[in-house]
């Protein structure tokens, strides 16, 4: 079984554990292979983690950061995941890291799919991938009910252009295959509502209803679920 779950009574305790573990993992990758590759997600949950990581004394010039998914908006818009990463993670010590954007100059996300796929395919195996989970069971921009969900779960290309049914906005998402090309995947979750969704996701193995199941039930990559739910 590749899945382990760590339960914490507070977000602070979770962050103490996660910040240290990520730092050690990135340091080990740099020592062994010369570079470290870190995939992060957007949303409000990772902001406190980003702030902590940004202050870590790490060989940040040897770290590459990339997003698991992105809304197809300009990086100056408040809803942009890239803006979130630049504002909170790529600061202080971490300002020296390399950032790989999922955005292009294309007005339509579907026109950019092949270019972004090639960009992501050039990156080696990721060292750590940090994912979130929506209350509908989505992760990255792999949404239940999305026309592109099956493609996102089965394609070997690295990126998939998506229009979410719950939020009708174009997005670019890493595919399941590209996300699983990693040494470790983490799910960073907070709150009782997410704890309930996690139970539902673990109780069955149908990823069309809850795409997060495609990751929680696979046997290819170690998964560590970090849950702060008092």
Image (cartoon, rainbow, N blue to C red):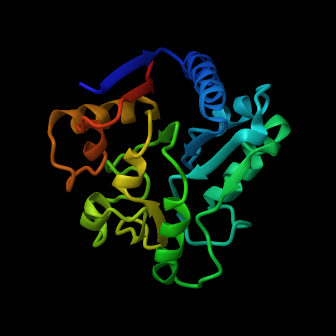
Asked whether residue 65 appears in the rendered view, the answer is yes
Task: Quadrant for the C terminus, please.
Answer: top left
Horizontal and vertical percent position of residue 147:
28, 73
* Residue in the image at 29% along x and 37% along y: 220
* Residue in the image at 52% along x and 49% along y: 124
Instruction: Locate residue 80: give its quadrant.
Output: bottom right
Judged left or right of residue 144, residue 113 is: right
On screen, 65 above or below 161?
A: above
Q: Residue furthest right?
A: 92
Horizontal and vertical percent position of residue 199:
25, 31
Horizontal and vertical percent position of residue 65:
64, 47
Instruction: Locate residue 91: give its quadrant.
Output: top right
Judged left or right of residue 96, residue 137 is: left
On screen, 82 above or below 18?
A: below
On screen, 228 above or below 196?
A: above
Horizontal and vertical percent position of residue 54:
76, 35
Asked whether residue 134 appears in the rendered view, the answer is no
Judged left or right of residue 227, residue 206 is: left
The one nearer the camera, 114 or 146, is: 114
Judged left or right of residue 222, residue 63 is: right
Task: Quadrant for the N terminus, please.
Answer: top left
* Residue in the image at 57% along x and 20% along y: 21
């Amino acid at each position: 079984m590749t899945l382990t779950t760590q339960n914490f009574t507070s977000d602070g305790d979770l962050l103490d554990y996660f910040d240290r573990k990520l730092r050690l993992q990135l340091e080990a990758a740099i020592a062994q292979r010369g570079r470290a590759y870190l995939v992060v997600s957007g949303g409000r949950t990772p902001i406190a983690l980003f702030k902590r990581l940004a202050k870590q004394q790490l060989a940040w010039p040897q770290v590459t950061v990339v997003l698991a998914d992105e809304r197809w908006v300009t990086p100056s818009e408040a809803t942009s995941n890239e803006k979130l990463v630049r504002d909170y993670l790529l600061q202080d010590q971490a300002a020296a890291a390399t950032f790989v954007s999922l955005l292009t100059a294309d007005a339509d996300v579907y026109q950019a799919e092949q270019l972004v796929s090639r960009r992501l395919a050039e990156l080696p195996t990721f060292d750590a991938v940090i994912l979130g989970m929506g209350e509908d069971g989505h992760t990255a921009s792999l949404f239940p009910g999305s026309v592109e969900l099956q493609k996102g779960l089965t394609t070997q290309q690295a990126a998939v252009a998506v229009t979410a049914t719950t939020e009708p906005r174009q997005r670019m998402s890493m595919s399941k295959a590209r996300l699983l090309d990693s040494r470790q995947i983490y799910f960073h979750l907070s709150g009782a509502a997410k704890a309930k969704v996690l139970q539902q996701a673990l109780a069955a193995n149908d990823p069309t209803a809850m795409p997060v199941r495609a990751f929680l039930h696979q046997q290819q990559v170690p998964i560590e679920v970090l849950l702060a739910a008092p």
